[in-house]
Amino acid sequence: MKKLLALVLAAAAMLTMLASCGSSTKYIVLEDNFGAEEYAVGFRKDDYALAAKVQEILDEMYADGTAAKISEKWFGSDVCLKNNDFPREMKTVKDDNSLQYVLDKGTLVLGLDENFPPMGFRDSESGEIVGFDIDLATEVAARMGVKLDIQPINWDAKEMELSEKKIDCIWNGMSVTEERAANMFLSKPYIANAQVIIVAEDSAIKSRADLAGKKVALQKGSSALEAVQADEATYNAILNGGEIVEFDENLSAYLDLKAGRVDAFVVDKVVGEYIIVNN
């Protein structure tokens, strides 16, 4: 019994020490970043009818204040972008049954990375997938007269999941890029974002230039990776003695930063700020 008690006390002491160590380091978003961008909902390349209906309902929600209330719940203010144009031209295709396909089966299947707070993520207490995008999509589905079916996917395979009709849309803080606009039909951008760098507050890294030769964490298949690769000078400087470390989801990347296994973490601004605040 004494041995067991000693082990319990030792474990408690270790947990206290770890908690103390973890709380002593703060993490910050650097002002220097990899550029501004915007989020949109992704549909199959020729699913114009479905995209048009979803956009029509979103526009109604902007007009009647529903979207603003959802935004205030998650961000504290109305951050929704309104009156934007589609990234590419909306067309009318004679045999486009994409909307009827969803109406007939009675479900709108939403694909997402379930570790992308506050856009869409699994609540640690309830186990349910919640978030800003989830609330928007739930209301859109209700107004469309169908049930929202939330389907976690491997973010790196999102285009394949969409093209194989395993999901009907990608709605999870997906950044607008030229490649995505060419391979999917994207909604009007609805949230502003940027790809930012997160480091420990006492880190020597103060800008993109300081990433040279460092280990940089980010999500596999993400726009963060695309943004870093697009900045050729920074990307080559990182690889000159350093490494791009790719993770399946952002929370694992952040945990490796906290553990000191990487030097910096590149991520969407809205996600990074939420992770820092909620630790």
Image (spheres, rainbow, N blue to C red):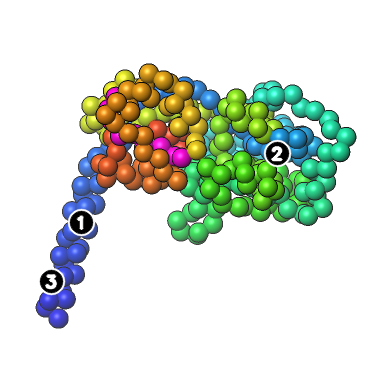
Residue 64 shown left or right of residue 249 in the figure: right
Query: Viewer-proximal residue, 226 or 150?
Result: 226
In this view, the residue farthest toward the bottom is 1
Q: Nearer the viewer, mark 2 or mark 1?
A: 2
Q: Which residue is mark 2?
A: 44
Give whichever of discs 1 and 3 has the lower sequence position: 3
Give percent across and percent down for residue 64: 71, 35
Is disc 1 placed on a helix, strand or loop?
helix
Residue 278 placement, left or right of 54: left
Measuring from the top left, give residue 98's x and y in whole percent. 79, 42
Mark number displayed over residue 16: 1
How many angstroms separate mark 1 from mark 3 (CA)?
15 Å
- Please identify the quarter of the rendering in which residue 277 is found: top left
Q: Amino acid at mark 2?
A: Arg
Give the amino acid at mark 3: Ala
Residue 217 magenta: yes
Q: Residue at x 41, y 23 (%)?
A: 33
Q: Is residue 60 magenta?
A: no
Q: Secondary structure at mark 3?
A: helix
N-terminal of the pair, mark 2 or mark 1, is 1
Tag on residue 6? 3
- Amino acid identity at mark 1: Thr
Residue 213 drawn above or below residue 147: above
SS assignment at label 2: loop
Residue 235 in view: yes
Q: CA distance from mark 2 to mark 1?
A: 50 Å
Region rendered in magenta: 212-220
Q: Is residue 270 visible?
A: no
Residue at 61% in and 31% down: 180
